[in-house]
Amino acid sequence: MDKFSILKQYFGHTVFRPGQESLIDGILSGRDVLGVMPTGSGKSLCYQIPALLMPGLTLVVSPLISLMKDQVAALLGVGVKAAFINSSLTLKQLQAVYQRLREDSYKIVYIAPERLASDGFVRLMQEQKISLVAVDEAHCISQWGQDFRPSYLKIVEFLEKLPSPPVLSAFTATATAQVRQDIIDILKLHAPLSIVTGFDRPNLFFDVQRPKNKMTALRSLIGARYGKSGIVYCATRAAVERVSDDLNAHGIGATRYHAGLSDEERRRNQDDFQFDRKPVMVATNAFGMGIDKSNVSFVIHYNMPKSLEAYYQEAGRAGRDGEKADCILLFAAGDITTAKFLIQNSGDNEELSAAEQAQVKKRDYRRLEQMTGYCKTTGCLRNNILDYFGQNHEDPCENCGNCKSTYTMTDITLEAQMILSCITRVKHQLGYYVGATLIGQVLRGSKDKRILELNLDGLSTYGLMRQESRSRIGEYIEFLAGEGYLYTNPQYATLELTEQSAKVLFQGETVAMPVKSSPSPSLEGLKKKGKKQFTQRNAAEESGLLTALKALRTRLAQEEGVPAYIIFSNATLADMASKAPHNIYEFLEVSGVGEVKAARYGEAFLGAIATYEEGDGIS
Ligand code: ADP
Ligand code: MG
C-alpha cells in the first residue's frame, strides 16, 4: 500500500489537497513536521495516512472530547482501527481500551492531553511501539495564543518518558509567526518540515453589515437560508439566551451553547445541532473547537469577536464541505466597548507572571484593533484577512460584501459637531457624562420625564436634530465612537469626549462616513423575498435525486445513531447525484467513497438511485 491507494481505498479521494502530500512524505521519511493549514483544508489526513503506513501506533493529542469522538467514529466508518481516551470513558471502558492496546489492536488512538500524565497510560505506552505522535490544534501550546491550554505542556513531559522518540507532527490553523515559533520551540520539533498553505477559503463569502436592528437583521438572514445549517456567535452568555429565545419565538429551530449550561444540556444541544435536528446553533466562543460538522452553510457573528484569528477560526467553520457558504458579521460600535470590557475583565491565567499577563492584555488590545479594522474597512474583506495572516494576494476578490458594493463617503461634519457639542453641554450642566440614549433624546428634543427633570430642555443643543431618526443618530454616534471622535466608557457606557473631538469642534476637521450604497447580494435577496420563496428556490435548485439521497442518508444516520455527515458529506452526495452510478465500480468513483463505505452503503445508495431513475422514467 502507498499513500495514494490509502487515500483512495480508505478515504475515497483521488487527489491530495495542497500541503497534504508534502507533510505525509515528510512524516514517512521520519522527519518532524509542522502543518499550518486553514480550517477544513484536511489536516487530519496528514497524520491519518502515515499512521496507516507506519508500523505500530499513532497517538493523536486533541483538545476536545466531542472532536475525538467524531474523528474516531469517522475512522471506524472507513475501516481504520481507532479509539479515544478521555474523561468521558467509564473506568470499564478505559480498561477495555487499555486491554485492546496491549493486544496491538489499534492503529490510531486519540488522547486528551491531561491523560498523558497518567502513570498507567505512560507505562502502557512505554511498552508500545509508537511511531508517530500528532498534536492537533497545536497552537493550544502557545501561551500567547488565545486558546492556551496548560495541559498541552504535558505533551513534552510525556514524550521525554518514551524509550524511543517517535516522529512528531503538529497541526494548527492559527498562522501568526509567533505562535508557529512557539509550537516548534515548546514541542522541540527537530528540524521540522514546515508547510504553511494558503489561508484563502474561496468558497466563503465574507460580509460585514451594520444593521439598525441586529435581531431583525439576523432573523431575515436566517430566514433567507431556510433549512440550512448555521452557527450564530454571540459575545456573551446573556446575548446567547436572548438571541436563541427570540429565534425560537419566531419559529426558527435554534439551540444554544455556552459555558453556563450544564454538561448534560451542552451535550444534548450540540447533538441536536450535529444531527441536524436543530438547524441553528446560537453560541459563545465556547462552542467550536470540537465541531467537525461539515455542512455548516453560514456563520453569523451577532457581535464582533476579539481578534481576527478568533473570527477566521469561527467563521471558518462554515463550508468545510467545500460548498459555498456565508460568513457575516453584524457590527455595531457598541461591540468594541463589549470586547474591551471582556479583555479588561478576562480571568487571569494563573500560569503567567504579572508582567506576562500585562503583555497578554496589550496584545489582546492590538488584536482588537485589527479586528475593528476589518469591520470598518471599505476595501476587500478577504484581502484584509489574508494580509493579517501574512499571505500574499492579488486583486480584490470580488466575492465579499465590500467588493460587491460601492461606498459613498458622506460628509457628516455638521452632525458630528452637533453631537459632540451636545455631549459637552450636558456634561457642563450635570457635571458628569451620560449615555447615548440620553444624548439622542436631547438632540431630538424629547419630552421624556428625565430630560425635563434634569432641565436638559433648556440647552442650546436641545432639539437640534429633531428631523433625524433615533437610529440615524445612533449610527452617527457609533461611527464617531468607532473613529475615536468619541469614547464609550466601558464601565458606565457613557459617551465621553476625546482629543479628537476637539479637532472637529474647534479646528475645522471634517468627518466623512462611508455609506454602503448597494447592499451585498445576501441582503438584497432577502429584502425582496420571503422565507417561502426561498424554500421553493432551494428545493428547485436541488435535484430530485439529491433529495432522495439525502433522505436515505438521514435514515441510515438515524439507524446507526451517527451524524449524517459521518455517513457521507454533502459534497459526496452532490457528486453522487451528478454521477448517478449504476454499479459498485462507478460508485467507487464518487469523491469521498472509499472501499469500506462502498461495501457498507453501496447497495443502499445504488438501490436508491435505481429506484429514482425508474420513477423518473415513468413520470
Ligand atoms: P481540518 O482539520 O484541516 O480543519 P479536516 O481534516 O477535518 O480539516 O478535513 C475537512 C474535510 O476535507 C473533511 O470532510 C475531509 O474528508 C475533506 N478532505 C480532506 N482531504 C481531502 C482530499 N484530499 N480530497 C477531498 N476531500 C478531502
Ligand atoms: Mg482538524
Image (cartoon, rainbow, N blue to C red):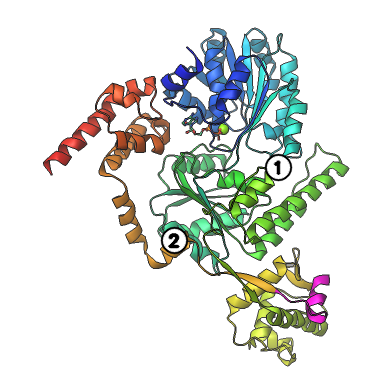
Left or right relative to 299: residue 442: right
Tell me which corner region of the image, top left, top right, bottom left or bottom right, holds residue 28: top right
Q: Which residue is mark 2?
A: 249
Q: Secondary structure at mark 2?
A: helix
Main SS of the magenta part reads helix
User: As rendered, which of 6 and 126 lies closer to the eye?
Assistant: 6
Q: Which residues are magenta?
A: 499-511
Task: Please tell me in which quarter of the rendered image ligand 2 is found.
Answer: top right
- Which amino acid type is shown beneath numbered disc 1? Gln
Question: Can residue 91 be seen in the rendering of this structure?
Answer: no
User: As rendered, which of 373 and 481 lies closer to the eye?
Assistant: 373
User: As rendered, which of 311 and 576 lies closer to the eye?
Assistant: 576
Tell me which corner region of the image, top left, top right, bottom left or bottom right, holds residue 183: top right
Q: Which residue is mark 1?
A: 146
Q: Mark 1 or mark 2, which is nearer the start of the sequence?
A: 1
User: As rendered, which of 545 and 150 lies closer to the eye?
Assistant: 545
Q: Is residue 503 magenta?
A: yes
Q: Tell me if label 2 and label 1 are in contact, CB under 8 Å.
A: no
Q: Which mark is residue 283?
A: none
Residue at the image position 41 percent from the left and 25 percent from the top: 12
* Residue found farthest to the right: 355
What is the distance, in whole Å, between disc 2 and disc 1 at their CAs? 34 Å
Task: From the top left corner, tell me how far across and down residue 322 is, in percent.
Answer: 46, 40
- Which amino acid type is shown beneath numbered disc 2? Ala
* Residue found farthest to the front: 395
Density class for disc 2 (Cα within 10 Å; few <14, some 14-19, many ≥20) is few
Residue at the image position 61 percent from the left and 46 percent from the top: 312
Q: Secondary structure at mark 1?
A: loop
